[in-house]
Amino acid sequence: MATKGASSGTGRPYAWYFEPLRWLLLGLAHLPLAVLYLFADVIYFLLAYVVRYRWRVVTENLRNSFPEKTPAEIERTGRAFYRHFSQVVVEILKLAAISPDELRQRMRFVNPELMTRHFADKRLVLSLGSHMGNWEWILSGAALEFPGRAAGVYKPLNNLFFESFMRRLRTRLGADAVPMLATLRYLVAHRGQGHTLSLLSDQAAGPEDKPYWTNFLHQDTSFYTSADRLAVQLDCAVLYVGICRVRRGYYEVTFTELPDGRVAKDAPAGTFPVTEAFARQLESDMRASPEQYLWTHRRWKHKRN
């Protein structure tokens, strides 16, 4: 049985018994962020000291990425990550109710002109981001900074309720949410209109994806190469999206121009200039603020053959 009118991004209704959860989440989202951060403190304590959520994965990732750090430094960085992550959780929930003015105050785009000059030329822009800072706030902030021009690629969730709820969060302030398999179709449809499409490009690419391998934080690391192909195929500009928390609840976003994907004729096979440049930018940001990266996911689960 499903609730009439309650549907996911797929258009399929989710079960009626999720409605109380929806109202609870919306009620929490209407609380001031100062109150939600009190919940974040509780979440932090539970994750870091009681449940120890993926603690082994987090510390292993940190040790392998920063072999120069002492065990005590790894421990401190891990705890700092859990505090940051707990704050991001409530900030993402707040997207269900935050006002445009409040989000504008909390999200500062340092150099938006790098984006708008491509819009003036009616070019598509691939915005390559990662799970740094608050990755969900970037899309909504961009929708306010560049009205009618921002979209983000996402992987649809299997649970219809959470698919619906997360889609509401991502699109509420004017952004488009594009399912992963619809990426090319969306870009073709908006070619020549001056749009940007955001891709979180730090996921672990598997062997079936024919990934690009590079040394990243002292480890053999696989990256998806779709940005290189799309940039050439559709003549897209490419920007790296760096985000940094400057204090609790406030972030700065900085764009960096990346190569356009064209490969020199004498370049060796397997050259992916966009992906390599993205990896180097992300590596620099992660070294500068390691606690602001999402260390709970298994970024290095694949091995080079």
Image (spheres, grey):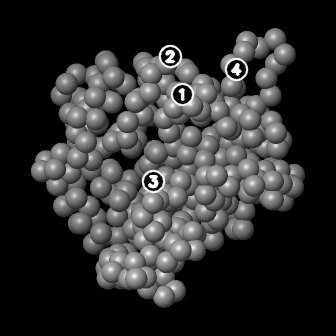
In the visual, does 272 lie left or right of 233? left
Q: Which mark is residue 244?
A: none
* Residue 111: x %, y % from top left: 66, 49
Q: Which mark is residue 134?
A: 3
Contact between labelled residues 2 and 1, with CB atoms less than 8 Å apart: yes
* Quadrant of the image containing the N terminus: bottom left
In the depicted structure, whether residue 158 falls above or below residue 117: below
Residue that label 1 marks = 207
**Which of the two discs, 3 and 4, sits closer to the camera?**
4
Q: Between residues 2 and 54, which one lies in front from this camera angle?
A: 2
Q: Which comes sooner in the sequence, label 1 or label 4?
A: 1
Going 27% across and 50% down the picture, which residue do you hit? 83
Q: Residues within 10 Å of mark 2 (few under 14, many from 20)?
A: few
Q: Determine the CA span between mark 2 and mark 3.
A: 34 Å
> What amino acid is at disc 2?
Asn
Going 46% across and 45% down the picture, which residue do you hit? 131
Residue that label 2 marks = 305
Contact between labelled residues 4 and 1, with CB atoms less than 8 Å apart: no
* Residue 182: x %, y % from top left: 68, 55
Going 63% across and 59% down the picture, which residue do you hit? 178
**Which of the two discs, 2 and 3, sits closer to the camera?**
2
